[in-house]
Image (cartoon, helix red, strand yellow):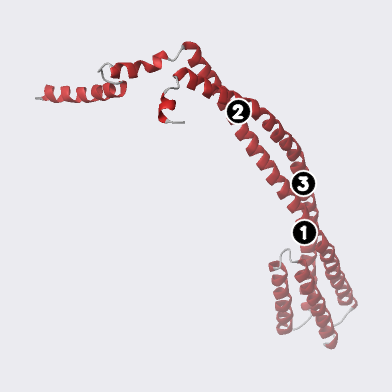
Amino acid sequence: MTPDELLEITPDLLARAILHRRERLAEAIPEQLDARQEELDIAVPLTRTAKENRDNFDKEINEISDKCLQSQTQANQLFTVMCNSLQEGDSKHYQGEFSSLMQIYKESNENHQQQGIVLDQMKDLATELFNHICNEGKSSSEIESQQVELLNVISESVTSHEELLPLQNNLEKFNDTYLENEAMRRRADSRTALLSQALDYSERGIEHWQRLIDKGLDRLLVNAKRVREGEYSTPALSKMNKVNPSQNMKQGGD
């Protein structure tokens, strides 16, 4: 379109073209909005279910992990009691070794394979302690019972960690599923919100341009007509009104 052709377009024709454009947008948006809303309706329950599954599975893992920690506390108590039958130097040596393994165990949080290795080392240390006690001639039925209980407690922890290994892998799957559904929900929610805003904007635009057309556009040309007749435009008048008070204040000060 040439500049001359563009100048020939009347304000009424331009307004009707804008109105037509707004109406076409308003007609197209609802179908898209329904599709996005349908996606959101699907994504929300999927995300909720995935989160519940992940949280429940995580709770199950935490319960087993807490049981393992309780077993470790019990094992530490039994080991300390057995060490008390030795001389102070030997007792401190074995307690220090067991404490070091306990620290490694705690620092290997959620690394169940590594914790299983540490538990096996604890069993070996417990057997070494018992053999040392026997070699010192200080063994008794009570110590033998403590030794059996200590090994059982550690063995139970080993079994629990073996159960946790596949559970941990499944937890990652549950978490990945939740994250995928949550991403889909957020995407659908964002698109729904944007389309809702666009529909509202288009509807308000239709009302605005229809109102202008109904009332007539001649009042919009008042400023142009005034300029053609040699008068000041509205922006120029506004600027002059801002300047004149300042000048009047200076004159009053003089």
Comparing 183 with 88, the one in front is: 183
Q: Seen in the image, is 212 located left or right of residue 188?
A: left
Q: Which numbered disc flags the more N-terminal residue, 1 or 2?
A: 2
Split into 4 quadrants, where in the image is the C terminus? top left
Q: Residue at x 74, y 34 (%)?
A: 38
The residue that label 2 is drawn on is 25
Ranked by sequence position, the earlier of labels 3 and 2 is 2
Q: Closer to the camera, 82 or 26?
A: 26
Comparing labels 3 and 2, the label whose residue is closer to the camera: 2
Rounded to the nearest whole Å, what is the CA distance between mark 3 and mark 2? 37 Å
Amino acid type shown at disc 3: Ala
Q: Is residue 53 above or below residue 21?
A: below
At 89% across and 73% down in the image, what residue appears?
148
C-alpha distance separating marks 1 and 3: 24 Å
Name the one closer to the observer, 253 or 237. 237
* Residue with the mark numbered 1: 66
Provide the secondary structure element on which disc 2 rests.
Answer: helix
The image quarter containing residue 75 is: bottom right
Q: Residues within 10 Å of mark 3 (few under 14, many from 20)?
A: many
Identify the residue at horizontal 55%, vertical 21% (top origin).
Answer: 206
Q: Earlier in the sequence, mark 1 or mark 3?
A: 3
Residue 252 in the image, given as x and y percentages of width and height? 12, 22
Q: Position of residue 93 (x, y in %)?
A: 71, 82
Viewer-nearest of labels 1 and 3?
3
